[in-house]
Amino acid sequence: MWVMKVGGGCLRDVEAVRQLPMVLQAAYPEARRLLVVSAFGKTTNRLVALAESAARADLSAAHRVFGEIQAFHREMVEGLFPFPTAEALWKRLEEKYWQGLWQRVQALAHLGEADGAATDAILVYGELLSSEIVAAYLSGQGFPLEWIDARRLLVTDGAYPEPEVLLGPSQANVDAQLVPLFRTHRLVITQGYIASDLRRRSVTLGREGSDYSAALFAQLLNAQGMIAWKDVGRLYSADPRTYPDAQPLPELSYAQAAEMTYYGAQVLHPRTLKPLRDARIPLYILSYFEPEAEGSLIAEKWVDPLPPIRATRKGLLLIEVESVDLSPLSLGELLQGLEAEGIEVYFAQGGRRTAALAVQGPQDSLERWRTTLPAGWEVQLRQPVTLSTVLYPSENFPLPNGEALYLQRLPDRIHWLTYEI
Ligand code: ASP
Ligand code: MG
């Protein structure tokens, strides 16, 4: 069993979707495979805009965005299928999805305010539509397959915007509903990013969450491996668009890859690696547009040496704390308090009198955290900052120049913070 994931950046237009049969031929065509797809191109961004207009009760703006989303999908369908087939498929999509999507837009407009569950009820349509169109296309290209709604499989606690997946109930669903499909078919298609809560309401797993879905399915199916087909089909020591001398990384351990993504490398959703590590499932990152090209493997083996790896994480909030009454600061206490509020800390540096932290978390949690601090500790919130990280720096790795607000040099890494302009 293999789990394969194809993202929206790969499925961005008709030409790109036409590449899919070749990609499927290139990897384990005889094996049983679960194909996990994301929404086409930038559809999720548009659905977010649609939900925002609805939450403002601006139905005319919502109608315009809805029209754009429909036109984009219509173009896909007309480009992929001959006329009568395209019409029949469009009619089916109309009944099964477009009507329901517009109803949910109206429901949110009626509510007239931002609401997590009502927004997610809209966002899930991107993956439902893309997977349905891809399934129809691949069937027409001679791939017998089954399609299944991922919301029937992955169950979460419904927390917004990043719910916890409940492995017990999800496993039961996978065993009862997904595994039997493989008795008659070698290929099954489902959606990334979407799931349900215990009350069977739609939820999403956080932006760019399809990698994470695929990893969960790999774990639940006890797959031999997972393949993430990507636009940029391998890992690099830095973003090659910014650093032309970035070096390809043929192999990394789970922990090494997790660290890279944690500090901001955009290659994978950060939650992807845990399910794979837990089940010891190797992850291959391969090029969607050049499926035979060499990619990257993430598995158990610690790789040493590695070239210096650069990652940047933007949009963090800088918190500076100062003890004004000379009571000693405790970095541990600060960190514990932030953790208790569910605030993620990416950088922490401190002494007896001052500390600096770069964090990400909801405003109200931060406000709550502030109220728990001793009166003599003064807090300044400054934003936004970028955290730059170099993992495995060479001894003479050049340190950043004067613009760094804070700099931390550890044996195996360098971190620094800069203001964003
Ligand atoms: N379509 C979703 C998003 O754009 C999930 C994904 O692409 O992985 O966030
Ligand atoms: Mg996407």
Image: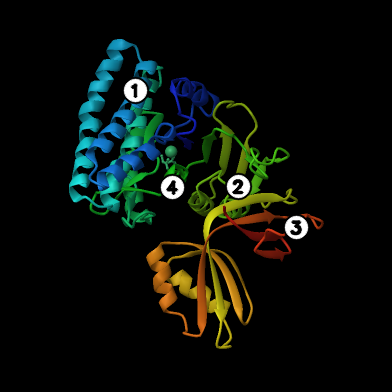
Q: Nearer the viewer, mark 3 or mark 4?
A: 3
Marks 1 and 3, how far apart at CA: 53 Å
- Residue 312, image x and y in percent? 60, 51
Relative to 48, is 57 on the left or the right? left
Q: Nearer the viewer, mark 2 or mark 1?
A: 1
Which label was assigned to residue 136? 1
Answer with mark 2 or mark 1, whichever residue precedes in sequence.
1
| Mark 4: secondary structure | helix
Which quadrant would residue 178 be assigned to in this image?
top left
- Residue 410, image x and y in percent? 71, 65
Mark 3 residue crowding within 10 angstroms, few (<14) / some (14–19) / many (20+): some
Answer with mark 1 or mark 3, whichever residue precedes in sequence.
1
Q: Is residue 328 above or below residue 26?
A: below
Which label was assigned to residue 399? 3
Label pair 2/3, CB-CB below 8 angstroms: no
Q: Which kind of residue does numbered mark 2 sit on?
A: Ala
Q: Nearer the viewer, mark 1 or mark 3?
A: 3
Which quadrant would residue 239 be assigned to in this image?
top right
Relative to 399, is 320 on the left or the right? left
Q: Which residue is mark 4?
A: 216
Looking at the picture, the colour scheme in use is: rainbow
Q: Nearer the viewer, mark 1 or mark 4?
A: 1
Label pair 1/3, CB-CB below 8 angstroms: no
Residue 191 visible? The answer is no
Q: Which kind of residue does numbered mark 4 sit on?
A: Leu
Q: Which residue is mark 2?
A: 299
